Image: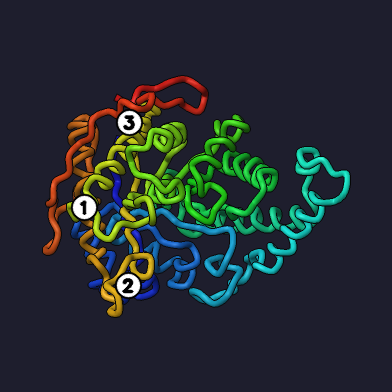
């Protein structure tokens, strides 16, 4: 298995809040050559942002530097190509997303149905209202349009010699979707992905349907067909925040080990009980959280080795203000995320070497002028308060080790 490390555009260029993070570069023409010098294998970029910059421009620059990409899509809000405001748009040929007002009416209609006299909740929830059907259809259409165009514009790297697209990362649905609405989306979406040969990692992200470890766990338990086919992008910083706990929590660890066999791509950010991003994961007070997340990320690699992956991809995704904390009254970030993210990437490279050895191809990152491998982190022992094993999507058990 080869480790490929991609760098997020978030907080790195002017179009993605780079100035708020004091980013050293302003656009992709400046940034991508520097990332290539540091040894990165590729970038992660929102699809709508790529349309705004120019898909041909992005693809040509990546090919020039022998780099690849993962493309992030969303099924609602201003980051959808069919919407305006951010990064241009609406772009021709893309559907407008469901508005907040439409979603509120949809939920109102559901509420009225479920609170009507003589209605049995469980039975009533089995069917969707007309507005629920419409909302799901819009999310599905918006999803398919972006995935299909991402593969068309950037080319599947495994099928096209000049293709740069590794996979799509999807922010799917909303956390206010009912279980039946999610089911109505995921079953056709996953079947379509398989039919088209598209690789999409649905992200475990706050605000999305997979926002919670408990919601995700129970949804996959209840619908084994979805559990068997869904591919995930794991951002576990959201789950530790939603659970409002720390990395030692046995119930959270159990939920994470349950979804590990479905993970294809990892967003490596260190979260904590009260937020999705610590002020600086290198700081002594946050190192225990960093080490706890590193253990989870190790589990993903072990599972991918068991599943016969030929490559694994990741980004470090510590974001700029206001996602990042700032010094009060100053707007000064508490840490330079250019260095923070490079440190996470370097730590993962070292850990891949320790975990996988010379039999597997490591990334080739080098220290930057401002950030090396220090401070060190330690490898945590196998936890003794959970099962220390995870179930594959077909129900078989695999050892974490």
Q: Quadrant of the N terminus?
A: top left
Q: Which residue corresponds to the image point at 46% horizontal and 57% vertical from the top-left?
A: 72
- In the displayed structure, 321 sits above or below 379; it is below
Percent coordinates x, y for residue 5 in the rendering: 29, 49
Percent coordinates x, y for residue 346 in the rendering: 19, 50
Q: Quadrant of residue 302?
A: top left
Of marks 3 and 1, the one in the foreground? 1
Q: Which residue corresponds to the image point at 18% horizontal and 32% vertical from the top-left?
A: 358
Residue bearing mark 3: 302
Task: Identify the element where label 3 is drawn.
Answer: helix
- In the displayed structure, 186 sits above or below 152; it is above
Residue bearing mark 1: 285
Q: Are marks 3 and 1 in contact (CB under 8 Å)?
A: no
Q: Quadrant of residue 301?
A: top left
- Please tell me which residue lies in front, 228 or 299: 299
Distance (Cα) linking label 2 and label 1: 27 Å
232 relative to 58 in the view: left or right: right
User: Outermost residue toward the bottom?
Assistant: 329
């Amino acid at each position: 298995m080869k480790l490929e490390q991609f760098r997020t555009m978030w907080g790195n260029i002017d179009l993605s809040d780079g100035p708020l993070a004091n980013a050293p570069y302003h656009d992709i023409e400046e940034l991508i050559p520097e990332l290539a010098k540091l040894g990165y294998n590729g970038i992660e970029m929102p699809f709508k942002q790529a349309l705004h910059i120019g898909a041909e421009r992005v693809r040509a620059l990546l090919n020039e530097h022998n780099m690849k990409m993962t493309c992030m899509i969303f099924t609602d809000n201003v980051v959808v190509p069919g919407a305006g405001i951010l990064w241009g748009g609406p772009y021709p040929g893309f559907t407008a997303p469901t508005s907040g007002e439409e979603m509120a009416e949809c939920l109102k209609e559901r509420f009225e149905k479920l609170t009507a006299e003589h209605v049995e909740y469980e039975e009533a929830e089995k069917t969707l209202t007309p507005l629920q059907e419409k909302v799901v259809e819009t999310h599905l259409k918006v999803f398919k349009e972006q995935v299909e165009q991402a593969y068309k514009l950037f080319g599947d790297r495994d099928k096209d010699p000049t293709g740069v697209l590794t996979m799509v990362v999807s922010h799917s649905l909303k956390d206010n979707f009912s279980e039946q609405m999610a089911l109505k989306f995921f079953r056709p979406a996953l079947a379509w992905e398989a039919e088209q040969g598209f690789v999409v990692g649905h992200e475990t992200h706050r605000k999305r349907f997979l926002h919670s470890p408990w919601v995700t766990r129970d949804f996959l338990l209840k619908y084994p067909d979805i559990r068997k086919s869904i591919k995930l992008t794991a951002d576990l910083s959201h789950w530790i925040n939603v659970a409002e706990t720390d990395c030692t929590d046995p119930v959270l660890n159990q939920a994470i080990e349950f979804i590990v066999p479905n993970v294809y791509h990892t967003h490596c950010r260190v979260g904590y009980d009260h937020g999705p991003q610590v002020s600086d994961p290198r700081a002594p007070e946050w190192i225990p959280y960093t080490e706890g997340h590193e253990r989870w990320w190790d589990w993903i690699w072990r599972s991918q080795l068991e599943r016969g992956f030929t490559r694994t991809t990741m980004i470090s995704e510590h974001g700029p203000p206001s996602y990042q904390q700032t010094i009060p009254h100053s707007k000064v970030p508490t840490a330079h995320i250019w260095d923070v993210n490079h440190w996470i990437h370097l730590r993962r490279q070292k850990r891949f070497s320790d975990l996988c050895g010379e039999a597997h191809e490591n990334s080739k990152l080098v220290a930057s002028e401002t950030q090396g491998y220090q401070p060190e982190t330690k490898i945590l022992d196998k936890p003794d308060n959970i099962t220390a094993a995870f179930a594959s999507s077909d129900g078989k058990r695999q050892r974490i080790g």
